[in-house]
């Protein structure tokens, strides 16, 4: 049994932690001060939609990072939890974190596109949190995840713009409806060619209505939206899938950014920059 001091040292050696949370021995991931993002607060938004007892259930945590959400699902008794993340640094953190809670995660060092397009597995619960806007083909992954969901999917995305009361909807738009389509409340997905928030892995941002429209179009029924950024949904229209014998997928990336799909390693200088910035934020 390792002392909290030893665990703290090992945790720090695993680099920059995006998800800050506490291990059962009291050690907290991260550098000790307020994180830029609060994983616990995100969990609070969805936990009442997750059954207390997940015995016998399977979970997919897409873009699961260092495993905070997967661990919560395992602590509720999930039989199996598959965490997919293309960054080997996060997979190592998730392996370490799961060990602290004495739970076992299935860790897959892969990209969302490649994983979703090469498996026929389906899961009772799917977590798709903080990832949609990082993908070059978000609709493709969302459609596959919808098909892969047996019971419930949790989708979180940053959005652009305000929360409109309603938007003018027609069941068939005409070319003369251009102004209606340009209405800020009309469902939209914004393409970001350059960097966004200094992050080369940001590609698309929906507006409030666009986020919902994408989820519905994947064949899902929206159960609730506990926050503008969070949608809880269930399978509604089952479109099914087509299985083809060969997949040839384009690789993509931004200047000086990672190249997806495939497993990734953080550029050492970026990783050190992230550690430097999080320490600076702590001062
Ligand atoms: C903003 S974080 C969200 C992490 C976690 N889901 C959460 O809500 O706290 C985005 C995560 O997605 C992963 N990611 C980025 N690009 C990905 C891709 N193409 N496929 C799968 N995961 C990806 C990142 O490595 C990171 O762990």
Image: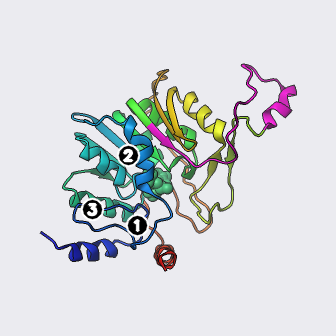
* Residue 201 locus on image (x, y percent): 56, 58
Left or right of 217, for residue 14: left
What distance separates the C-alpha of mark 2 from that of mark 3? 19 Å
Q: Closer to the N terminus: mark 1 or mark 3?
A: 1
Q: Please report the residue visible at 22 percent of the width from the left and 51 percent of the height from the top.
A: 104
Where disc 3 sits, the SS reads loop
**Residue that numbered label 1 is attached to:** 17
Closer to us: 254 or 214: 214
Disc 2, ligand 1: is the CB inside 8 Å? Answer: yes
The reply to whether residue 7 is visible in this rendering is: yes
> Would you place residue 179 above or below residue 262 in this image?
above
The chief SS type of the magenta part is loop
> Would you place residue 177 above or below residue 258 in this image?
above
Is residue 234 found inside the magenta-colored segment of the image?
Answer: no
Name the residue at the right extreme: 176
* Residue 249 locus on image (x, y percent): 52, 46
**Residue that numbered label 2 is attached to:** 61
Query: Label 1: few (<14), some or many (≥20) within 10 Å?
Result: many
Q: Please report the residue visible at 21 percent of the width from the left and 72 percent of the height from the top.
A: 4
**Residue that numbered label 3 is attached to:** 23
Where disc 1 sits, the SS reads loop
Mark 2 touches mark 3? (CB < 8 Å): no
The quarter holding residue 263 reads bottom left
Nearer the camera: disc 2 or disc 3: 3
Name the residue at the left extreme: 1
* Residue 52 locus on image (x, y percent): 28, 37
For the N terminus, give its image quadrant.
bottom left
What distance separates the C-alpha of mark 1 from that of mark 2? 17 Å
The quarter holding residue 93 reads bottom left
For the magenta stretch, what is the residue range? Answer: 154-183
């Amino acid at each position: 049994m390792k002392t909290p001091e030893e665990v703290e040292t090992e945790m720090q050696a695993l680099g920059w932690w995006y998800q800050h949370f506490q291990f059962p021995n009291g050690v907290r991931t991260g550098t000790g001060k307020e994180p830029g993002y609060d994983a616990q607060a995100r969990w609070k938004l969805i936990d009442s939609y997750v059954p207390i007892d997940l015995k016998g259930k399977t979970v997919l945590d897409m873009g699961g990072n260092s495993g905070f959400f997967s661990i919560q699902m395992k602590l509720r008794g999930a039989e199996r939890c598959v965490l997919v993340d293309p960054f080997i640094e996060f997979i190592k953190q998730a392996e370490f974190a799961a060990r602290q809670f004495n739970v076992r995660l299935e860790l897959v060092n892969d990209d969302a596109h490649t994983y979703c397009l090469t498996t026929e597995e389906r899961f009772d619960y799917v977590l798709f949190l903080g990832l949609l806007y990082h993908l070059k083909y978000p609709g493709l992954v969302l459609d596959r995840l919808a098909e892969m969901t047996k019971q419930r999917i949790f989708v979180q995305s940053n959005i652009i713009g305000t929360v409109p009361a309603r938007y003018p909807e027609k069941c068939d738009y005409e070319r003369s409806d251009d102004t209606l389509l340009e209405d800020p409340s009309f469902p939209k997905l914004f393409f970001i060619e350059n960097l966004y928030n200094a992050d080369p892995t940001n590609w698309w941002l929906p507006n409030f209505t666009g986020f919902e429209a994408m989820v519905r179009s994947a064949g899902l029924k929206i159960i609730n939206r506990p926050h503008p950024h969070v949608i809880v949904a269930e399978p509604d229209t089952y479109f099914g899938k087509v299985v083809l014998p060969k997949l040839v997928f384009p690789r993509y990336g931004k200047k000086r950014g990672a190249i997806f799909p495939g497993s990734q390693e953080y550029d050492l200088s970026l990783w050190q920059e992230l550690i430097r910035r999080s320490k600076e934020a702590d001062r």
